[in-house]
Amino acid sequence: MTVGAAVRAPRRVLFVTGKLAEPALRRTITEMGPAFAWEVAVMKITVAALMTTAWIARFLQVPAGTDLVLIPGLCEGDPTVIAQRVGIPVEKGPKDLRQIPEYFGRAALARDYGGYDIEIVAEVNNAPRLAREAIRREAEHYRASGADVIDIGCTPGREFPALGDVVRELVGEGMRVSIDSFDAGEIRAAVAAGAELVLSVNASNREVARELAGSKARVVVIPDFGQGLETLEPSVAALEQWGCHTSSTPSSSRSGSDSCARSSATRRRTGATPARRSSWGSGTSPSSRRRTRRVCTPCSSPSARSWACAPCSRPR
């Protein structure tokens, strides 16, 4: 048996996914109208991209009559591990579930995300580890893919002497740039070079925001490390006193309902508007009517459209 050789005319296909991506996967397959019978195996995991082939092999139950198992393309590991256990061909499918029709020889679904009122922030992760040319190529890719703001993600403990030049170059190319760092020196350098958004500020580094009061840069306020939303208040109050443009974002460690309740309480106490959170990290809610959302670094695909639901496999 050769694993990985596509079975283009299967009789019954088992699609493997996680809980979050199940509805989108079923909708995509239904709209494709395949000639083969199909089923979806929803594993006991929220984000399918975090599955490994060894883990799938341990828990996957394959219905009788299945002649192809298709797993998300972002799953780590060799599909042979699964094939040896279930006794039928196993393949890694595409990374984006909208490409499943194309995978089976049909036209891919249109890449239309519909109407939206958000600004998309795409992060160049660990930028200090990349060459200048690599950063520029990645930024251009994100802009061409629909990103509104290019976020330069710094690496804690790693110096980035070229940061100012990198930001200046991207701004010179007409890009809007944000800086993702807690380091005061990096924040100063990036804003001086034209960065318009600072991710992120809390009690550990908020003094640097005092210097940004006369600039156009917006500052994203987050809770203090390991603390709750109540720690937003001192930071928001200080930045407002200094005349900074601020947004606030709830802690990712909270459950959804708890975060909503605490966010409402924070709005009542401070008047700040907590930022909406996306699948990949903190977003911001600017003072304008538009919202900001961070997208996946490797593929810049919104999670609702990704088969694995978390394309970059980052912890949620």
Image: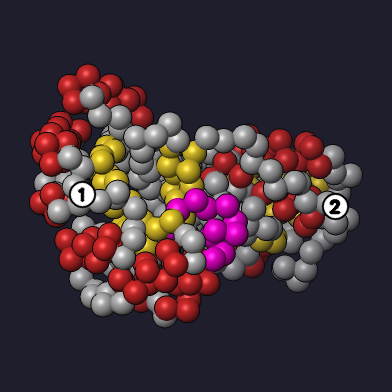
**Horizontal relation, residue 15 to residue 195: left or right:** right
Is 143 colored magenta in this rendering? Answer: yes
Q: Where residue 174 sits in the image (x, y, percent)?
A: 49, 61
Q: Visible in this render: residue 111?
A: yes
User: Which residue corresponds to the image point at 66% horizontal and 61% vertical from the top-left?
Assistant: 92
- The local secondary structure at tag 2 comes to loop
Q: Is residue 128 left or right of residue 60?
A: left
Instruction: Name the foreground residue: 182 vs 312.
Output: 182
Reading the chain from its start, which is encountered first: label 1 or label 2? 2
Type of the residue with mark 2: Arg
Q: As displayed, is residue 54 above or below residue 19?
A: below
Q: Position of residue 81 (x, y in %)?
A: 60, 65
Tell me, yes or no, if residue 311 can be seen here.
no
Q: CA separation, marks 1 and 2?
A: 55 Å
What's the residue at 31%, 65% (across, down)?
A: 193
| Relative to 185, 119 lies left or right | right
The dot on residue 15 is: none
| Vertical comparison of 174 with 235: above or below | below
Q: Quadrant of the N terminus?
A: bottom right
List the residue tagged with mark 1: 214
Dot 2 crowding, Cα within 10 Å, few <14, some 14–19, many 20+:
few
Which label sits in the foreground, 1 or 2? 1
| Near-viewer residue (196 or 303) | 196
Q: Where is mark 2, residue-wise?
A: 106
The x, y position of residue 289, in whole percent, is 43, 31
Please report the bounds of the magenta region as a residue range: 140-151
Quadrant for residue 23, please give it: top right
Q: Residue at x 26, y 77 (%)?
A: 161
